[in-house]
Image: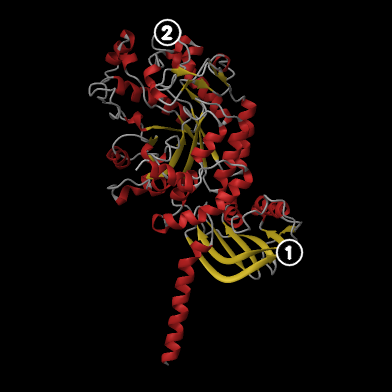
Amino acid sequence: MIKKILGLLFIFTSTLMLEANASENVSIVPKPQSITLDNSEFKITSKTKITFVKEAKSVAVLIKEFLATGSSLKLKYKQSNRAITNTIHLSKDTSLAKEAYTLSINKKGIQLAAATDIGWFYAFQSLKQLFPVDFAYANNKQSSVSVQGLDIEDAPRFRWRSFMLDEARHFKGTEQVKKLLDEMAMLKMNVFHWHLVDDQGWRIEIKKYPKLTEIGSVRKSSQVGPLKWDSNINSGEVHEGFYTQEDIKEIVDYAQSLKITIVPEIGMPGHSAAAIASYAWLGTHKTPIDIPTKFGQRHVTDVYDVTDPKVFEFITNVLDEVMALFPSQVIHIGGDEVKYKHWNSSEHIQKFIQDKGLAGPADLQIYFTNQVSQYLNSKNRSMMGWNDILGQKIHDYHNDEDNKTSVKLSLDTVVHFWKGDVSLATQAASDGYDIVNSFHKYTYLDYNYEKTPLSKAYSFDPIPDGLAEKYHHKVVGMGTQMWSEWIPTVGQMDYMIFPRIAAYAEIAWTEKENKNFKEFQQRLKNLHTRWDLKGIYYAPNSDVEKQINETK
């Protein structure tokens, strides 16, 4: 009897150790919520078939193509509701959430179960990472391949898992965007936040206003030098580029094939100098300006005149063309860093504020933002903006009088938190707003590895400390931002993005209690190899540690 009990204890203990060590032995990023190894493997050969329920056909084709790329295997595939021995089967499980999936591998076959094509797609992304690290990249033509036996149950922690690319400051082009979308898909990130317009450049074709790209996409020079914001050095080289509407359609279609939604950001009422340089009547002062060659708000000489009906008509016309290109439910309107001094110095804007009974410039911004929100709502879209749009004082260049408010921001707005005391995010969530948390001290990719090392990036929690549990559901996700003022080249951009993007992907996907930084570093090694094979220039851990140590 004692031997029997000891035997059962041994089996139980061994099972727990197997589950505990599973994530260390399985190099999937982001880490799945549950992994159990079963000490078996499945060998895929030319006799293996791919079967699938009708709704999963597109992912079945992706699996077939993936296997053909990394081996000599040309597997047959067919629709079937039943899994048999020696198959890779995609089955439907309606009990699973939209993005959830299960992945089971044993000596008999592989089964990917989901309720939607998104779930099957994410199951496929995990499956790919179980193959040899050089599979599909090193021109291998083996006639069979074996995959570790296991069971995975997985679903994301947050529904908003975004990466933002700023191309207003430095245009990068279609090839770089598609490369980033590919890596986002592998990491199960589902929102590409595309910052397309700003003071230093307008990068999207708007047919009704051709000067936006004829003039607004061309900058005469760019601020450069080690002092960055304080530099007096300019490149002396023209910087230009924009996406045609056909380019946009191509990229949107590509993103949709990867289950990624592109959320465009069309900044207003600040960060609008490129538009005002194209059409002077858009500005508060109604006088011609040049596109700033220096970065930062101190060099910007105007913002939109939000009291002018003609300006609002311009904004709605632009939004109409944007909405025709982007199917995203959410449209980002920026709303950050508006220099109220331009409105404060305008007699006609001050009169408008008084006539409308507004408390000041911050109140005027909320009033205007709500108008934009109502317009987007009328088109069955919703609005998102940086947390400046709440009217709270988060900048030193605003005084208390500037930030007096009486108007409340529309509650259906998604507030994108980036700056200010975290209590402001807590207040917004408790007031009923959905929050995407992108607190700059943790999530900005233009910050070097000394300021935001990989460990600090990985430590970020989108749910602010002190937020009552009843409001946790109002934090719908997080984003990481690649601002490009000081990132002119693709290689430099990749170095700043990778590997930190993998940390942010895991934060957004993996439950907090399942995270472990040392274990993440081990799983990251396979990604390093894949990035090497893809020609992606990333910051290796040794370089990151060296930069940190040199500052001590």
In this view, 233 is above or below 477: above
Q: Position of residue 303 (x, y in %)?
A: 40, 16
Q: Which residue is mark 2?
A: 286
Q: Position of residue 447 (x, y in %)?
A: 42, 36
Could one spot residue 293 in this view of the protein? yes
Q: Position of residue 267 (x, y in %)?
A: 45, 25
Kindly indicate whether the residue at mark 1 contacts the one at mark 2 (C-beta within 8 angstroms): no
Q: Which mark is residue 45?
A: 1
**Outermost top residue:** 287
Q: Is residue 363 left or right of residue 509?
A: left
Label 2 to label 1: alpha-carbon separation: 70 Å
In this view, 489 is above or below 541: above
The amino acid on which the numbered mark 1 sits, given as a three-letter code, is Thr
Could one spot residue 118 in this view of the protein? no
Q: Nearer the viewer, residue 344 or 51?
A: 344
Of the 4 image quadrants, the one containing the N terminus is bottom left
Q: Nearer the viewer, residue 2 or 49?
A: 2
| Residue at the spot 35% in from the left edge and 23% down from the top edge | 365
